[in-house]
Amino acid sequence: MKIGMIGLGRMGGNMADRLRAGGHEVVGYDLDPQSGRDVDSIQALVEALETPRIIWVMVPAGKPTQSTMDQLASLLSDDDLIVDGGNTRFADDQMHARMLEPKGIHLVDVGTSNGIWGKEKGYALMVGGTDQDVERVMPILQTLKPEGENGLVHAGGTGAGHYTKMVHNGIEYGMMQALAEGYAVMDASDLVKDPGQVMASWREGSVINSWLLDLLVKALKEDPGLKHIAGKANESGEAKWMIEDALELGVPTPVTTASLYARQDSQIADPTTMKVVSALRKEFGGHPVEQE
Amino acid sequence: MKIGMIGLGRMGGNMADRLRAGGHEVVGYDLDPQSGRDVDSIQALVEALETPRIIWVMVPAGKPTQSTMDQLASLLSDDDLIVDGGNTRFADDQMHARMLEPKGIHLVDVGTSNGIWGKEKGYALMVGGTDQDVERVMPILQTLKPEGENGLVHAGGTGAGHYTKMVHNGIEYGMMQALAEGYAVMDASDLVKDPGQVMASWREGSVINSWLLDLLVKALKEDPGLKHIAGKANESGEAKWMIEDALELGVPTPVTTASLYARQDSQIADPTTMKVVSALRKEFGGHPVEQE
Amino acid sequence: MKIGMIGLGRMGGNMADRLRAGGHEVVGYDLDPQSGRDVDSIQALVEALETPRIIWVMVPAGKPTQSTMDQLASLLSDDDLIVDGGNTRFADDQMHARMLEPKGIHLVDVGTSNGIWGKEKGYALMVGGTDQDVERVMPILQTLKPEGENGLVHAGGTGAGHYTKMVHNGIEYGMMQALAEGYAVMDASDLVKDPGQVMASWREGSVINSWLLDLLVKALKEDPGLKHIAGKANESGEAKWMIEDALELGVPTPVTTASLYARQDSQIADPTTMKVVSALRKEFGGHPVEQE
Amino acid sequence: MKIGMIGLGRMGGNMADRLRAGGHEVVGYDLDPQSGRDVDSIQALVEALETPRIIWVMVPAGKPTQSTMDQLASLLSDDDLIVDGGNTRFADDQMHARMLEPKGIHLVDVGTSNGIWGKEKGYALMVGGTDQDVERVMPILQTLKPEGENGLVHAGGTGAGHYTKMVHNGIEYGMMQALAEGYAVMDASDLVKDPGQVMASWREGSVINSWLLDLLVKALKEDPGLKHIAGKANESGEAKWMIEDALELGVPTPVTTASLYARQDSQIADPTTMKVVSALRKEFGGHPVEQE
């Protein structure tokens, strides 16, 4: 197939490479002139494609995606199709679809996993949209996905691709934190000689066998005790969105929430909650407080 | 009554003062010669009392209390009675009672609240021991307690005094953290002009009316924004013990636990769990990590 | 002052009574003909007031409030003022204000606490709006509030009244759960004879002295062991909204969240998460599962 | 090697089979005469082995293990070695070692994973004890472990085997709960057509690729929607012990704790905490409560 690709960063660029290697023709555009882009504007990209067009958008979620959608809404025509392959919030997908629908422009949302490993091994793809629209982009999806029967799912209507990717990442948060707590306890205990060695042993025959375990063992071999990594972890939005939707659904997600809070805590240098607790301890108990 | 008091620090010294003001005779001992002690050894204290003796022990929990119990076990006689007014873990009370029982020495455990306010307003007392033993020390308890019908309870057998004090402090942790979270959210929101003023308004007519709220309003008046207090809070053991016993009882205590973890987190400069999470993010996603 | 009151249920009816007792003239309307309403439609209520009008809306949050706002938007004129005294989400206040503003209609949002006690003792009031608008309704607020210097705060611009009420309720959730966990642990332990008696003792001289403690002691006297109350608790939205805003602000609120999850859990008869955990235990360990 | 095996249940029996298939001689004993035991008492088992003996104990943790240890202490001689392959708490291992040491009896503690899959594929083994003792039982461990370089670790001194198994299971709890929450959210959302299909797709190319994911996909294929499994999950002690040790170490483990609490909650029909919350809501707000 011939498609347009907007966004040629680490993710988009690798995807374009994998698509070309798979026999597709890709017209690439990126804001950055050094990106190896084929055209120097979105308008030029639109003009370079025959109708009905398929354009894969792979730009950061939020304003960059919104701005791209707005431009495409004014440039595309009836029966053109946009794939949003970024990390857009599912509610925004639904808003975009409502904006595009009167112009006859179709939207498919695709959540992707496997980050830096995807170019070589394929990307796990979670897809939202109508049956017809998903069918239409299937040749591209088949090239991007990993080999084998798994790695691709049409999860539901518009937004379902990003929704299930969001849930995937929420699970990822919990699994990572579970491994982290286990490591931290062994690390703190005098009883365990080498927590990294213990974790390596679990790669065979244990219930927690997983890719994340493999990666942690690798990281611990490269940097025993993780001495060169700071105890701060970022969050990227998906776990937060999953918790917010779970709150509305009335489904308690204590582990996902605890995982997110641990990351948020690690970013806060001087937590206000602890200022309050410390101030109260001083008031009622005369406990000394650390002054600032 | 005439009693001995071992430990004349902030708590024990104030209690001795309140007891003397209430007409009791107190023979005081403390390790510190500057403490205003009446005698200079535990042996001298024991000798200064007529049998059957009553001795109130008000020293730090753990080794100091253990050492005092060991000494008293060898110095006291049949029918003497020890009151442990410190923060001993309830399981240790029961161990002490088993050690003292063959020698005919009685043990009453008393948990106390109201810290620095107690000398003037009285101490809330939670008492564990047999009916007879508690009856025997009742004149002292009546003097130490606040006025009114409340502020004193015979909670159960040996250990029940410290057990209920432990639960009291666990509740205290949760209440403090609840207030702290509410303050922190208002403080972070652009919408609220002055969180301290809002909290002050809640002192009348609101469901969360409480002494802790009063104290927080006071602290916020003295130091608006709590700018001079560091975001670190200590823990003193009781909430931890409550959680441990709740784990054994199979009673989930998520709020007490979250309150304790928040304090523990605030003491950890570079959390190992977040090193692991950050290392994993780097491994699978190529996310940049902060180096140390 | 003369005002209109829409909604004469438990809250609105009592407020109208308190206002009349305070010398104000209240024209009341309610959907229910049995409510003691003065007029039988919102239009009639609007016509019964002289411009510029003040109308207090005291109807359930969500659709009833939205529908009332929509009707008032079409009936009111320049310089009229609506007070939303219900439990509207702060983001909805801001949406209502944007809808009303082009017509010159003013909005003040008021969060109220003290439920069934307010008629007699006054309502704690948290108020959002411009200085001029809040000043304009001050005579009504002064009558509704409790006596004394506290119980009323102008928290900030539009939405700040409901925002701070939302935070108030979030704190309330945490405090209630803290008390509940303490009671549950004592109730489960063999060591404590009568948890209700212990809690009663804490009403004097203890750090956790609070109105909620008083109420719990009262409830335990009326129904020792709470044998006649089911172990299910509802949630009313505010704690959830507070958590959602805290998630966006990046302020961890583990205690508020744990309190909400405990209530949600209590409403779920057959939790899907535990089905999954149980299915997994069966798969890897051959552990027996309960069949349905 | 020739060893004794006490306990021929699902775990012990399969291990004896795997050991015999690996060329070892196993004298088996079990309380149950139908177990296929070789001897009908522990004494007979001890007499059937030449000194210095090696005896693998594979009985339930707690009293059965304690009773077995007590009997072996009186029957074994200098230089005999006991392997405790059960789920004993690490602190109990250390107590057992202190009891056996004066008699010259050695103790090695082994935590095992892989439950019902172990007979065929091997057991992941985590081992605690001295270098010499672990070396002595290495031929047995090599036969029991899975093929490959992983699946066996000498984690540290006495107790370290069960300690690391305990941590392994704590991690397992968190991972299972993370998967469960993700499934439950997708199941509750209208947006996702078939959560089981989504999870199946994640088996390739996704970060959360894991054996637990494979098992969940299998369970969902056998019983779509898990309609035949009750929403109750048991706990087996290890996660609780890990949390208790983490509390003492000052390492917050919010995800492990939340996972355990979710299981405990699922076992409690009528939670006392929610009775309290509900009673309080009735007291201050007149909210209706469900009666019992």
Image: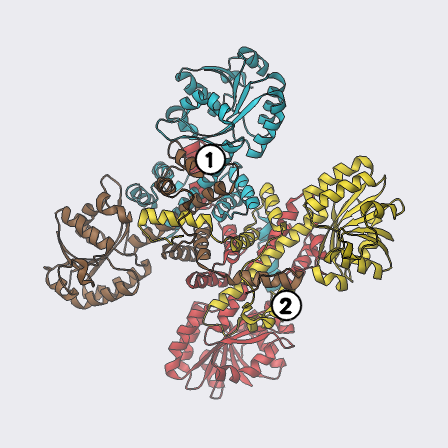
Chain colours: A brown, B yellow, C red, D cyan
Q: Choose between C102 and A241: the one closer to the eye.
A: A241
Residue of label 2? B214
The N terminus of chain D, quarter of image: top left
Q: Which residue is situated farthest in the front direction here? A: B33
* Rendered location of residue A199, percent (x, y): 41, 37
* Rendered location of residue A273, percent (x, y): 53, 61
Q: Which of pointers 1 and 2 indicates the residue nearer the eye?
A: 2
Whether residue B214 is visible: yes
Task: Tell me the kind of residue under disc 1.
Answer: Val
Are there few (<14), some (14-19), or many (20+) residues within 10 Å of tag 1? some
Task: Tell me the kind of residue under disc 2.
Answer: Asp
* Rendered location of residue B124, percent (x, y): 73, 57
In the image, which disc is placed on residue A113?
Answer: none
Report which quarter residue B197 is drawn in.
bottom right
Are there few (<14), some (14-19), or many (20+) residues within 10 Å of tag 2? some
Image point 32% across, 51% down: which residue? A165
Whether residue C229 is visible: no
Q: Choose between D270 and B18: the one closer to the eye.
A: B18
In the image, which disc is placed on residue C289?
Answer: 1
Q: Chain of mark 2?
A: B
User: Element under label 2?
Assistant: helix
